[in-house]
Amino acid sequence: MPYPTDQFESHRDAAFHSLKRGELENAKRQFTDLVTAGSKDPQDQFGLAMVYYNQREWEACADHLGSACQLQPGFVHAWLYLGVVEEQRGKIRAASSAYLRADRLMSGSDPSTIPAEVRALLGRGSRLLGDELFAVISSDLAEVIRDYSPQAIQRIIHAAEMFCGKRQIRYAHPRLRPGLFYVPDLQPRPFFSRDDFDWVNDVEASTGVIREELMVGLQTMQGFEPYVQYAADSREAQVWSSLNNSMSWSTLHIARHGKLLEDSCARFPKTFGLINAIPDLHDVPGYGPEIMFSILHPKTKIPAHRGSVNGRLVAHLPLIVPSNCGYLRVEEQKHEWEEGKLLIFDDTFDHEAINESENLRVVLIFDLWNPQLTIPERLAFQKVLNAASRFEADLIQESSTT
C-alpha cells in the first residue's frame, strides 16, 4: 500500500537500506510504493532505477533514470548511470549525451572532492565521448587531407588525438598550458617578434586613426562593460573575485567569439576595416576573432591566467598609455606598453597585466594565427574546433529532451 506523504523520508531510508542489503524485490516494492504515492523526490526514481540496474533490466532502468534527471537536471549520478545503461542497450549516441551532461556538471570541481565511484564513471564516459568525438573530427578532417595530405596536417591530427584522449599530452614547455586545445611541435615563445608578420608597420601607422575613433567612444562609454562576468555563486566568480562584474577592467567588443557586432562595426568603421584586413587574423567561427578595446582603470591588476589554444596569439595595440603605467607579464618576461607599438604574445603561458598609474590604460586587442601554423594546418584547426563545438551542442540539445 502506498505510503502517506508525511512518511516518505523514513520509508525512503528503508528502501535504500533494502537496496544496500541486496533485497531487490523488497526495495523494488518500497520504491514503487513511494513513486505511486506521488513522490517527486528524484532519489526515489533513482533508487528504483538502481534496482532494475542490479537486475540488468536496462529499459526500465533507463526510464527511471530519465525521470530522475527530469526532476533534478543537476543529478550527476543519474546522468552517469544513464550513460552506462544506454551503453548496455547499444544506444551510443544517447550514452554520449548523458555522459556529457554529467561531465559539464562536474566541470571545475576539485578532483580530490569527487567520490571514487563518480571518478570511475566520469572516466568511462570521457573515453566514450573521446571515441565518438574523434570519429566526428576525423570525418571533418578528411576534406583537408584530400586537398593536401595527412602529412600536411600531422600536428593537428596529433592535437586532435590528445584532445580526444587518444594520445598522451606532452607539453613542450613546463609552464605552457592551453586550457582547451594544444598543438604539439610549435616552438613555445611567450612573445613573438614584429618580424614574424609583414603587416605590423601598416597597423602601427594607423594608431592615430584608431585612437581618434576610440576617443569618441570614450566620451559616453556606451557599449563598454565588465570583461569578467560570472554568476556570483560560480567557481569562476571566486577565482576572479577582484574583477568580477567590475568596470575596473572593461571592454567594448567589435567582434566576439568570431561574430562581428554590427553596432560596434558601424561606430568604429576604420578600426574594424584595418583589423579585419590583417591576413593573419585568427578566424574560427564560434571562437575567434576577438577584437575589442580594453580599458584597465588606475591601480588595477588583472591576475595571472591562461588562454585556451596555442594555435592563436593575442595582439595588444596600445592606444592610451600613461606614464609609469605598469606592464604586461607573459611567463617571466615583462614588457611595458608603448603607444603605437604592438605586443604579440602566446596567452597560453601564465600572464598578467597591471596599471599602476592614476589614469586609464587602453589597448586594442585582437587575435592572430600562430605564424608557425601552415595554411592547411589552419584549415584543419578550424575543422577540429568547429567539429567539437557542434558535437557538444548537439549532445546537450539531445540530453535536454531526456
Image: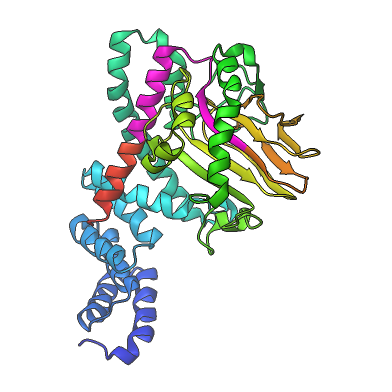
Q: How is the image coloured?
A: rainbow
Query: Is residue 293 visible in the rendered structure shown here?
Result: yes
* For residue 246, side relative to residue 324 (left or right): left
Q: Tell me if 255 is positioned left or right of 89 in this view.
A: right
Q: Which residues are magenta?
A: 363-388
In front of the other: 110 or 336: 336
Picture quarter with the N terminus: bottom left
Is 207 a magenta residue?
no
Q: Residue at x 57, y 34 (%)?
A: 212
Query: Vertical placement of 303 versus 268: above or below?
Result: below
Horizontal and vertical percent for residue 113?
Answer: 57, 57
Residue 80: percent from the left, percent from the top?
A: 36, 54
Classify 272 as above or below 22. Answer: above
Task: Report x, y in % for residue 2.
Answer: 22, 86
Which residue occupies the extreme right position in the image? 324
Q: Quadrant of the C terminus?
A: bottom left
Residue 346 falls in which quadrant of the image? top right
Is 365 rendered above or below residue 392?
A: above
Which x, y percent locates residue 129? 35, 39
The mark tally for this picture is: 0
Near-viewer residue (398 or 12):
398
Residue 364 falls inside the magenta stretch? yes
Left/right placement of residue 141 relative to residue 165 reads: left
Q: Residue at x 63, y 58 (%)?
A: 241
The answer, for residue 178, to whether it is visible in the render is no
In this rendered view, identify the residue nearer to me: 291 or 228: 291
Quarter-of-image position of residue 204 = top right
Q: Nearer the viewer, residue 59 or 217?
A: 217
The residue at 53%/64% (across/down) is 233
